[in-house]
Amino acid sequence: MNPILVANVVENNAHTERTRKQLRTGTSDVETTVIMFLRVLL
């Protein structure tokens, strides 16, 4: 896999997570865990 592509995906995920937290501050622990899990898989 292209390292630049991976970096872009990680950056997009971080941006999405930030936006989601701004939209609704009450982010559930389950969702946070899932995001972390997906990040580890990537």
Image (tube, grey):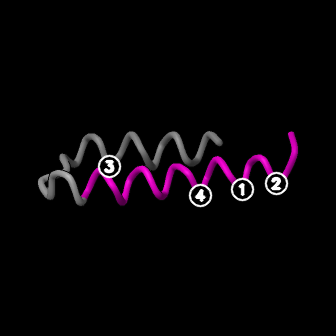
Tell me whether circle 2 and circle 1 mark residues in contact (CB < 8 Å).
yes
Quick check: 40 left or right of 1? left
Q: Is residue 6 magenta?
A: yes
Which quarter of the image is occupied by the N terminus? top right
Task: Give the class, few, some or many, for how many residues have Cα within 10 Å of label 3's Cα (few <14, many ≥20).
Answer: few
Q: Earlier in the sequence, mark 4 or mark 2?
A: 2
CA gap, disc 4 to disc 2?
Answer: 10 Å
Kind of residue sitting beneath label 1: Ala
Task: Give the class, few, some or many, for how many residues have Cα within 10 Å of label 4's Cα (few <14, many ≥20).
Answer: few
* Residue that numbered label 3 is attached to: 32
Give the farthest residue toward the left: 26
Q: Secondary structure at mark 2?
A: helix
* Residue that numbered label 1 is attached to: 7
Q: Secondary structure at mark 3?
A: helix
Tell me whether circle 4 and circle 3 mark residues in contact (CB < 8 Å).
no
Main secondary-structure element of the magenta-colored stretch: helix
- The tag on residue 4 is 2
Q: Which residues are magenta?
A: 1-21
CA gap, disc 3 to disc 2?
Answer: 25 Å
Tell me whether circle 3 and circle 2 mark residues in contact (CB < 8 Å).
no
Kind of residue sitting beneath label 2: Ile
CA gap, disc 1 to disc 4?
Answer: 6 Å
